Image (spheres, rainbow, N blue to C red):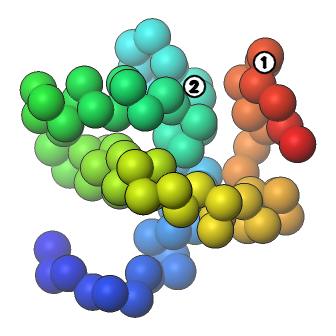
């Protein structure tokens, strides 16, 4: 993967729609995963492939306070509903 300072719009759209496929947070949008869970993965190793890249990107977004930048895309329906118990405002 080659680093680019300009995010790929298709990759961001895929990240916004991505869901956790296994574990305690199965079914959750990756962007809704707790930061502590993402840090746990970073300490033990992210999964290989696209999921690992998306989890690592999600951690970077959250750790740098950039989640709000993606909220307008999420609110336009680019993401399925959030898990129960989460504030959707």
Foreground residue among 81 and 37: 37
On the image, the x and y values in percent for residue 49 come to: 20, 50
On the image, the x and y values in percent for residue 26 come to: 50, 20
Outermost residue toward the top in this view? 24
Q: Is residue 24 left or right of residue 41?
A: right
Please, what secondary structure does the residue beneath circle 2 have?
Answer: loop
On the image, the x and y values in percent for residue 89 come to: 88, 42
Location of the N terminus by quadrant is: bottom left
Query: Measuring 53% from the left and 62% from the top, which residue is drawn there?
Result: 66
Query: Measuring 13% from the left and 30% from the top, which residue is drawn there?
Result: 43
* Dot 1 or dot 2, earlier in sequence: 2
Q: CA distance from mark 1 to mark 2?
A: 11 Å
Q: Mark 2 — residue?
A: 27
Q: Is residue 41 left or right of residue 87?
A: left
Q: Is residue 41 left or right of residue 38?
A: left
Q: Mark 1 — residue?
A: 84
Q: Where on the picture, by quarter, is residue 60?
A: bottom left
Kindly indicate whether the residue at mark 2 contacts the one at mark 1 (C-beta within 8 angstroms). Answer: no
């Amino acid at each position: 993967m080659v680093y680019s300072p300009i995010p790929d719009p298709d990759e961001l759209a895929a990240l916004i729609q991505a869901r956790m496929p296994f574990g305690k947070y199965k079914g959750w949008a990756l962007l809704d995963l707790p930061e502590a869970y993402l840090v746990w993965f970073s300490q033990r190793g992210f999964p290989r492939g696209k999921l690992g890249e998306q989890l690592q990107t999600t951690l970077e977004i959250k750790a740098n306070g950039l989640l709000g930048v993606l909220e307008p895309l999420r609110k336009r329906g680019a993401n399925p509903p959030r898990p129960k118990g989460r504030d959707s405002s």
